[in-house]
Image (cartoon, rainbow, N blue to C red):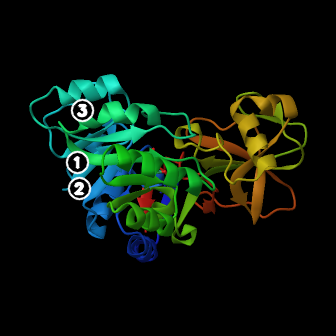
Amino acid sequence: MTGTTLRIDEAAWRTSLDRVRDATPGLVPVAKGNGYGFGLPRLAAEATRLGADTIAVGTPGELDAVADRFPGTIVVLTPWPGAPADDPRIVPTISRLDELRRLAASDNRPRALVEVATSMRRHGLAPAELADAAPLIDRLDFAGWTIHLPIGDTSAEAVDLARTATAARPAPLWFSHVGADRVARIGAELGVETRLRLGTGLWLADPSAYRATSTVLDVHRVRRGERAGYRQRKVPGDGWVVVVSGGTANGIGLEAPTAATTLRQRLTAVAGGGLAATGRALSPFELDGRKRWFLEPPHMQSSLIFLPAGSAPPAIGDEVPVTVRMTTYLPDATAA
Ligand SMILES: *Cc1c(COP(=O)(O)O)cnc(C)c1O
């Protein structure tokens, strides 16, 4: 291995996926973006193994990455103006009346979900538009109402919008970011089927089932005051400059590796060039037992890390832990 690698304990990962599936009636696995670090094709294959009848991608451009590994229905979460009306496997999300009118004008009875606007203020029909939408929806093979809520305690809003939508037209309700129990209760109360879209809560349910590692590519002994790196910055003391695989192209050093605000601020500063201003930023790479400072902002596929004298320097080829944010991480490889 020379790149940055996502090591997956497949048995443990699958155990966690099975557990979430068993606890989530109506589960719709979400496979979008960087595939939560695992990649879209792998998520599509796991959704198949889980027995899901439906998967959700984020954008139309992601359809090809999942279509040949998942045999069921594919929902596209992002509103898709001009969505095709003739592919029964693909279910677009409609979020505006003009788009709904266009699809309703087709003689194919196209499948579609219709999004209801929430306090997210992102996409969707306003509750006041739902009555106008109902007769148009009758011309569709309507998959249901979709309600995408902000993260947090949104149960009151969920019930409210669910009531309004099903009053306009009874149909399955698709939720995100609402607890499975809550969703089941809303469905029972309103007498409709419910679906729950899960990404993070499914794929990343057991963080002990996977870990990111980088490879030590080179190790250079340095003395205080010597210069190194693109920016020819002076090293802060005696020690080593350690070159590790993993950089901006892997999503490393761009985002907080944890939710800790101070760390986030520090690492965000790296991406913004703040390193030059502040002098240093803590890297997500662990050498000799702890996270070490970047010598300069991460390069595209590798990073220069300063390891102070008194530490045990790594050997070339060693694999070292790296803390990544799984929604931005693009490993060069996955392995057991
Ligand atoms: C991305 C997305 C999800 C999944 O979000 P997670 O927080 O990763 O579970 C669910 N619903 C919609 C509409 C989304 O866009």
Cα distance in 3D space between marks 2 and 3: 30 Å
Q: Looking at mark 2, is its residue's CB closer than 8 Å to ligand 1?
A: no
Q: What amino acid type is highlighted by mark number 2? A: Phe
Q: In this view, does 71 lie above or below 59?
A: below
Q: Name the residue under label 3.
A: 136
Report which residue position mark 2 lands on: 70
Tell me the element at label 1. helix
Question: Residue, x 13% and y 28% (percent of image)?
Answer: 106
- Give x and y (percent) for residue 104: 20, 30
Separation of disc 1 and disc 3 at Cα? Answer: 29 Å
9 on left or right of 195: right
Q: Which of marks 1 and 3 is in front?
A: 3
Considering the numbered disc 2 on the image, is that residue within a helix, a strand or a loop? loop
Q: Earlier in the sequence, mark 1 or mark 3?
A: 1
Q: In this view, does 55 lie to the left or right of 106?
A: right
- Is the C-beta separation of discs 2 and 1 under 8 Å? yes
